[in-house]
């Protein structure tokens, strides 16, 4: 009986050790990252550090996000984002691009260096990265100005569901910048951006239907509803975009 009990105890301990050695999932790491940042939880931060040292890209990215909020550790954040991006974490590539493009205290703006990281994330279907790179290319910010490439990147971001990109793509088709001018496509993307509750699109669509155009008759009632919706979303949901 004692032998059986000892064997069972040994099995339980072995199973416990195996569980402890199992790698956490990406979702579990992100929960710990949120806890470390929002609650300033030192134990959670130590977990992120330990996992980062084990070359877990998601942990490196979450630790970098934590370090971004600390001026004295922003250089470390930059390194961690790069490690995570090189390890295959697409969100880290986007965040690295953001940090380099905008620049923060301790990390000077370097849009030219940001572009390849945005491009990497965009290649892996990251909508915000495609949008950011599209804007850089459209404006010649750190990269050559190229209207056709900008339109292509906006189209990619819009296709991935980014409402801001849909709105910009509407303007691109209306003006014929890098694409053949197409008022029907411009209106389609404007309607799509409004459907995604993007305030500038709702406002512009409201003004369009209020006056009427070749694509639709004047509609005062719909214009009023759209303007009211634009105001509500501008006030309540702007951070979504």
Image: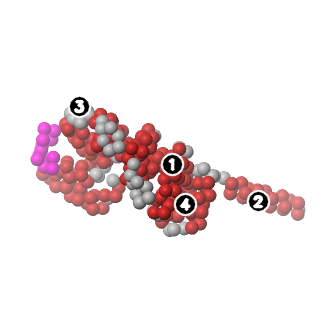
Asked if disc 1 and disc 3 are in contact, CB closer than 8 Å, the reply is no
The disc, 3 or 4, on the residue closer to the chain's N-terminal end is 4
Residues packed near mark 2 inside 10 Å, few (<14), some (14 to 19) or many (20 plus): few
The disc, 2 or 4, on the residue closer to the chain's N-terminal end is 2
Alpha-carbon distance for marks 1 and 3? 38 Å
The disc, 2 or 3, on the residue closer to the chain's N-terminal end is 2
The disc, 1 or 3, on the residue closer to the chain's N-terminal end is 1
Dot 4: what SS?
helix
Answer with left or right where residue 44 lies relative to residue 68. right
Q: Residue at x 23, y 59 (%)?
A: 231
* Percent coordinates x, y for residue 40 in the rendering: 51, 68
The colour scheme used to paint the residues is secondary structure
Answer with left or right where residue 221 lies relative to residue 122. left
Q: Which residues are magenta?
A: 207-219
Q: Residue at x 26, y 48 (%)?
A: 194
Nearer the viewer's eye, disc 4 or disc 1? 1
Nearer the viewer's eye, disc 2 or disc 4? 4
Dot 2: what SS?
helix
**Residue topped by disc 1:** 82
């Amino acid at each position: 009986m004692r032998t059986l009990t000892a064997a069972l105890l040994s099995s339980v301990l072995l199973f416990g050790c195996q569980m402890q050695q199992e790698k956490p999932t990406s979702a579990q790491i992100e929960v710990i990252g949120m806890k470390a940042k929002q609650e300033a939880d030192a134990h959670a931060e130590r977990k992120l550090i330990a996992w980062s040292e084990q070359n877990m890209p998601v942990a490196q990215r979450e630790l970098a996000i934590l370090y971004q909020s600390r001026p004295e550790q922003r250089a470390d954040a930059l390194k961690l984002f790069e490690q995570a991006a090189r390890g295959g974490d697409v969100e880290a590539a986007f965040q690295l691009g953001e940090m380099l493009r905008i620049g923060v205290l301790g990390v000077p703006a370097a849009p030219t260096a940001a572009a390849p990281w945005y491009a990497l994330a965009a290649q892996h279907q990251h909508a915000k990265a495609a949008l950011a790179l599209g804007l850089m290319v459209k404006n010649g910010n750190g990269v050559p100005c190229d209207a056709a490439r900008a339109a292509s990147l906006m189209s990619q971001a819009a296709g991935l569901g980014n409402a801001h990109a849909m709105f910009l793509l509407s303007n691109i088709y209306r003006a014929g910048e890098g694409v053949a001018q197409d008022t029907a496509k411009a209106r389609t993307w404007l309607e799509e951006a409004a459907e995604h509750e993007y305030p500038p699109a709702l406002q512009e669509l409201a003004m369009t239907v209020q006056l009427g155009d070749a694509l639709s008759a004047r509609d005062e009632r719909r214009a009023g509803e759209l303007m009211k919706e634009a105001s509500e979303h501008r006030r309540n949901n702007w951070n979504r975009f």
